[in-house]
Image (cartoon, rainbow, N blue to C red):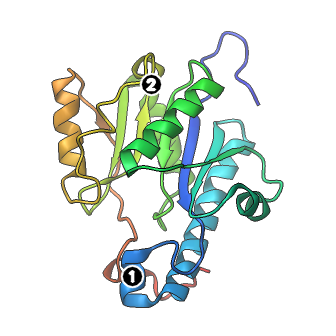
C-alpha cells in the first residue's frame, strides 16, 4: 500500500530479529535458561512483534521490512513463508553497522520515507506504541523509545536525517552497555537535535527480565 498523492510517504518499520534456533539467539538468556528454552522465548517474542506490526501494515500505517541474522536466505524464506513485506539478512558487523545497513536499504527502497528500527525483545509492545512513534516522527527528526536497561527499544529517523544517511547514531556507541541511550542523546545534542522520547519499556534479555512473564506462555 502506498501513500495517497500529496501525502507524506508511509514510514518504513525495520524489524531486526534473530533466527529462533538453539545456540543462535538469546545467548544472555540461555546462560540462565538453557539454549532450547531461550530459543522458544525468541520464537514467541518474534511472533508477538510480527502480530503487532502486521496489524499496522495491513491497515496501511507502514511498510514492513524484516532483517534477520543467524540464518541464510533459504531458511529465512521458509520461516517467513509468504508473509507480506520485504526481508533481508542483517549481514556482518556490529549492531550499529547492521542497523545503518538496514536504514540504507529501507531508504533506498522507499525514498523520502521515515524509517523506524525495532527489535523483538518486547513482550509489552502494542500497536499504540508504534502509532505513538509514527505520530512523534511527523514532528521530530529523531525519536527514541527508552528501555529500562539503558538502551532503547525503538529508533525513528525522519528522511531529513537520511539524505545523506548519517553515521553518528550508529557509530561510537557502546552497544550492549547501559550507556547506549545516554551516549545517543549526547551525540544527538552535539548535532543540534533534541530527540523525542517515547514510553519506557523493558527489554527481555536476561533471566531476571523473564520472571514477570513466566505466568503466561511465550511460545
Q: Which mark's residue is nearer the viewer, 1 or 2?
A: 2
Question: Which numbered disc, 1 or 2, marks the residue that appears first in the sequence?
Answer: 2
- Can you say which quadrant of the picture contains the N terminus? top right
Write down the quadrant of residue 178 in the picture.
bottom left
**Disc 2: which residue:** 158
- The residue located at (51%, 27%) in the rendering is 114
> Disc 2 on helix, strand or loop?
loop
Q: Up-down: is 108 above or below 31?
A: above
State the image coordinates of residue 20 (x, y, percent, origin top left).
59, 72
Q: CA distance from mark 1 to mark 2?
A: 35 Å
Residue 218 seen from this side: no
State the image coordinates of residue 194 (x, y, percent, origin top left).
23, 28
**Disc 1: which residue:** 212
Marks 1,2: beta carbons within 8 A: no
> Disc 1 on helix, strand or loop?
helix
Tell me if 214 is positioned left or right of 74 in this view.
left
Tell me if 91 is positioned left or right of 109 in this view.
left
Label 2 crowd (10 A; few <14 / some 14-19 / many >=20): many
Residue, far front: 92
- Can you say which quadrant of the picture contains the C terminus? bottom right
Q: Nearer the viewer, residue 130 or 50?
A: 50
Tell me if 55 is positioned left or right of 140 in this view.
right
Q: In this figure, what is the number of numbered marks?
A: 2
Tell me if 170 is positioned left or right of 93 in this view.
left
- The residue located at (48%, 50%) in the rendering is 92
Label 1 crowd (10 A; few <14 / some 14-19 / many >=20): few
- The residue located at (72%, 41%) in the rendering is 59
Residue, far top: 6
State the image coordinates of residue 97 (x, y, percent, origin top left).
40, 42
Residue 108 seen from this side: yes
State the image coordinates of residue 154 (x, y, percent, origin top left).
41, 47
- The residue located at (23%, 41%) in the rendering is 172
Amino acid at each position: 500500500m502506498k501513500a495517497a498523492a500529496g501525502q507524506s510517504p508511509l514510514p518504513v518499520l525495520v524489524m531486526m530479529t534473530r533466527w529462533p534456533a538453539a545456540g543462535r539467539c538469546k545467548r544472555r538468556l540461555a546462560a540462565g535458561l538453557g539454549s532450547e528454552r531461550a530459543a522458544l522465548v525468541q520464537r514467541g517474542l518474534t511472533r508477538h512483534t510480527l502480530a503487532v506490526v502486521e496489524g499496522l501494515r495491513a491497515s496501511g500505517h507502514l511498510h514492513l521490512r524484516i532483517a534477520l541474522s543467524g540464518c541464510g536466505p533459504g531458511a529465512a524464506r521458509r520461516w517467513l513463508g509468504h508473509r507480506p513485506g520485504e526481508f533481508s539478512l542483517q549481514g556482518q558487523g556490529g549492531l550499529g553497522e547492521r542497523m545503518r545497513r538496514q536504514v540504507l536499504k529501507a531508504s533506498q527502497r522507499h525514498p523520502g520515507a521515515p524509517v523506524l528500527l525495532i527489535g523483538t525483545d518486547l513482550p509489552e509492545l502494542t500497536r499504540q506504541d508504534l502509532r505513538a512513534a509514527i505520530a512523534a516522527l511527523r514532528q521530530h527528526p529523531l525519536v527514541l523509545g527508552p528501555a529500562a536497561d539503558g538502551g532503547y527499544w525503538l529508533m525513528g529517523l525522519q528522511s531529513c536525517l537520511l539524505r545523506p544517511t548519517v553515521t553518528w547514531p550508529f557509530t561510537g556507541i557502546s552497544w550492549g552497555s547501559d550507556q547506549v541511550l545516554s551516549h545517543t542523546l549526547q551525540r544527538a545534542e552535539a548535532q543540534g537535535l533534541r530527540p523525542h522520547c517515547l514510553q519506557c519499556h523493558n527489554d527481555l534479555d536476561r533471566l531476571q527480565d523473564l520472571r514477570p512473564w513466566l505466568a503466561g506462555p511465550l511460545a
